[in-house]
Amino acid sequence: MPQYELMYLLGSHVADSEVPNLTSQVLKFVEDFGASDVKETQLGKKKLAYPIKKTRNGHYVVVNFIMDSQKINELDAKIRTQDDKIIRYLIVNLDEHLKRAEKDKVVQSKIVRRPVPAVLPATAISKKEKVAAPEPLVEINQEELEKKIEEALSEDLTK
């Protein structure tokens, strides 16, 4: 039998004293449909990324269990028909998820990654030109530097 994970979210309108009663009720639903090896993990109250049904905080609970795949739809319907205390839930088949993750790893290992250049000048990026590697820095003393500056300034640019 496949292994499943049920994650559900209780709204902030549920009092903290009601949370144990609701979680035991959901565990009872899971066990009534023939689940075995049931493990519950309460992740606690957390802020949601976006409001759901005018709720900004929710209590997260995760239940792992093993169940016959034909009973999952019945469990899904039972959770869906509960009152509005469970504002979101998701049931995932972990066996299928792990198989898919292994396939993704194989595909990603075959992808040839393009190397990222170390540093590109801003003009090359805007023009999308190929740029040669920058020249290494050369140490120069003060006198040579002044001579090169004079040569550059005295050079005739009209040629």
Image (tube, rainbow, N blue to C red):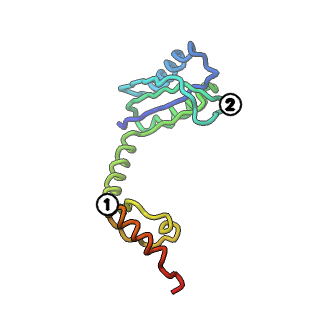
**Amino acid at pointer 2:** Lys
Residue at left 41%, top 28%?
35
Residue assigned mark 2 = 54
In the rendered structure, the answer to whether residue 118 lies left or right of residue 27 reads left
Query: At which x and y percent is residue 130?
Result: 42, 72
Residue 79: % across, % down? 55, 30
Q: In this view, which residue lies farthest toward the right?
A: 54
In this picture, is 100 found above or below 154?
Answer: above
SS assignment at label 1: helix
Closest to the observer, 55 or 101: 55
Q: Position of residue 12 (x, y in %)?
A: 61, 23
Label 2 neighbour load within 10 Å: few <14, some 14-19, many 20+: few
Q: Camera-side residue: 137 or 77?
A: 137
Front position in the image: 59 or 120: 120
* Residue 146 image point, x, y percent: 41, 66
Of the numbered discs 1 and 2, the one sitting upstream in the chain is: 2
Q: Is residue 42 above or below residue 98?
A: above
Quadrant in the picture for the N terminus? top left
Furthest toward the front, the residue is 143
What residue appears at the point 44 percent right and 28 percent down from the top-left corner?
63
What amino acid type is highlighted by mark number 1?
Lys
Residue wearing tag 1: 110
